[in-house]
Amino acid sequence: MGDAKNIRVEPIDRKSADAAVKRWHYSGKVVNNSQLHLGAFLDRQLLGAMQFGPSLDKGKLQGLVDGTPWNGFIELNRMAFSDALPRNSESRCIAVAMRMFRRLAPHVQWVVSFADGAQCGDGTIYRASGFALTGIRRNTSMWSDGTTSVSRTTMTKGAHIAANNGAASTDAMTAAGFKPIPGFQLRYIYFIDPTARERLTVPVLPFSAIDAAGARMYRGKPSVRAGTSTRDGAPVEVGGATPTPALP
């Protein structure tokens, strides 16, 4: 299987990155506003991709770190890796990507990403890669009709479920057979600029808060550790701004 240290991370075109995400990401869906695409190569084979871009709710997230300029942060929109890659490949690739930002895009002070604890996992890779946990919320952004899952942001822009103002209402989505997927969304931040952490406007949460909220999930399966609350337990809303949908 090889050694994660032998993985090469370099920019790739959007078409290649989208193909990797559709093949290996649990959702099979890309984020259309992704702007930077990094490929993970092992033995000259593209076996993974990371896609970065502006957050859908950029105005709200900007305030998570006081004094952040408009171009001072970016979101890791998608991270998709083949099981053929060796252990620790994700954390290795994230580390390389953060060094690239530090060297080539010094205006980027921090990176935000969201773990989808309703469909995928609670962010094990982020914790192993030095991200800080800054928010846990019961899921309201990912909805499903039992066969298809979509983000509420996508639905509200869809003409097929339109309210009077052209945006889909929660009532309209419910009437169409959609409802929030049970689970949680967890927000993580990586501080490329160490001073950005000092300007964080929300608390850094201990990782034990995941168990306290009953938000533990791995590979799409909820789990509860001994002595912790169930997934229906409180607290379920900690740390500020509403997450954007769909996580690596």
Image (cartoon, rainbow, N blue to C red):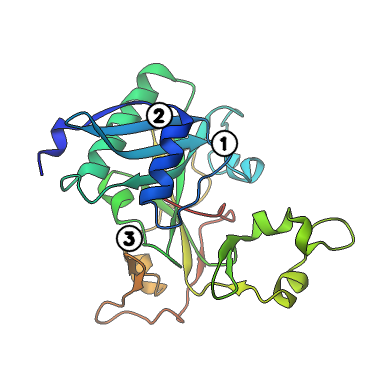
Q: Earlier in the sequence, mark 3 or mark 1?
A: 1
Quadrant where the N terminus lies? top left
Q: Horizontal and vertical percent for residue 194? A: 37, 31
Q: Is residue 94 above or below residue 80?
A: above
Q: Which residue is mark 2?
A: 193
Q: Secondary structure at mark 1?
A: loop
Q: Which residue is mark 1?
A: 54
Q: Is residue 188 above or below residue 45?
A: below
Q: How many marks?
A: 3
Q: Which residue is mark 3?
A: 207
For the residue marked with disc 3, what is the amino acid?
A: Phe
For the residue marked with disc 1, what is the amino acid?
A: Pro
Q: Residue at x 47, y 33 (%)?
A: 15
Q: Is 246 on the left or on the right of 191, as rendered?
A: right
Mark 3 vs mark 1: give the one in front.
Answer: 1
**Does the image show residue 69?**
yes
Q: Is 91 on the left or on the right of 80, as rendered?
A: left
Q: Is residue 28 above or below residue 175?
A: above
Q: Residue at x 19, y 46 (%)?
A: 88
